[in-house]
Image (cartoon, rainbow, N blue to C red):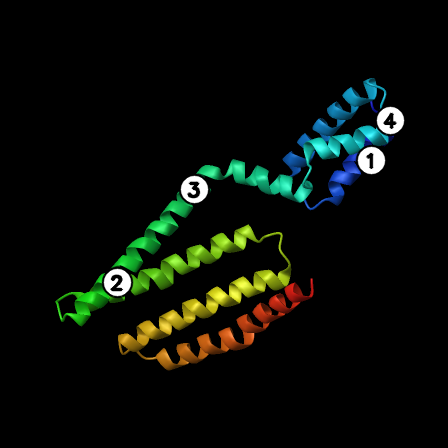
Amino acid sequence: MKLSDEEIAFISAEIDKSNISMQELKDDLLDHFCCFIEHEKKKGLSFAEAYNKATVQICPDGFAQLEKETLFLLNAKRIILMKKLMYFIGLISSMSISIGWLFKLLHWPGGGELFTYGFLGFVLLFLPLLAIDRYKLNLQAALSEKLRLVLGFGSAIVTGMAVLFKMMHLQGADILLIGGALIFAFGFLPFLFFRMYRKALE
């Protein structure tokens, strides 16, 4: 049974009301909904009943979750490659820091370089990649949650750079250390405790 123009317009409006940003996905959803509803109406269901059934079948967790899953499938290979690279950098950096620290304790040559380069890789490569990964996972989260992530990782990176500057006796270490501490104390911590407070009230 063919859908009327009003019914198609209703489905299109409902899809447009969602947070879906991909126009191709919107078009595909409209087509899927129309086909599904036409099929169900042939069985004797009303438009409203068929639409509700289509919603449960096509996007049971909502339009936003459907788009998230679609984006993941479209970018799965690139996402997996990025995660592999991120964790490989994290592993190599951590190993370099550990071995460098051991070499320095035993007064063996190369300890300082291993520790420095490992720490540099951890702070400037691994932490930013991890921050981007966690931010993408929380794209649908509230603004306060996003700010908590950004400020938390930002303070860690700035403080890490301050430690590195101190070790290498470079200028600006104190400014970086103060900046990292201020971001952590007045940026990250208020959002963290506000989130914990809200969870305690739920």
Mark 1 Cα shell of 10 Å, populated few (<14), some (14-19), many (≥20): few
Image quarter hosting the C terminus? bottom right
In the figure, is residue 149 to the left or right of 61?
left
Q: Where the N terminus falls, by quadrant?
A: top right
Residue type indicated by callout 1: Phe
Q: Residues within 10 Å of mark 2 (few under 14, many from 20)?
A: some
**Residue under pointer 1:** 10
Image coords of residue 148 (percent x, y): 56, 65
Residue that carries the numbered disc 3 in the rendered image: 80
* Residue 180 % position (x, y): 45, 75
Whole-angstrom CA distance, mark 4 to mark 2, is 67 Å
Q: Earlier in the sequence, mark 2 or mark 1?
A: 1
Vertical comparison of 145 with 66: above or below: below
- Element under disc 2: helix
Residue position marked by numbered label 2 in the rendering? 98
Three-letter code for the amino acid on which mark 2 is drawn = Ser
Which residue has dot 4 on it?
46
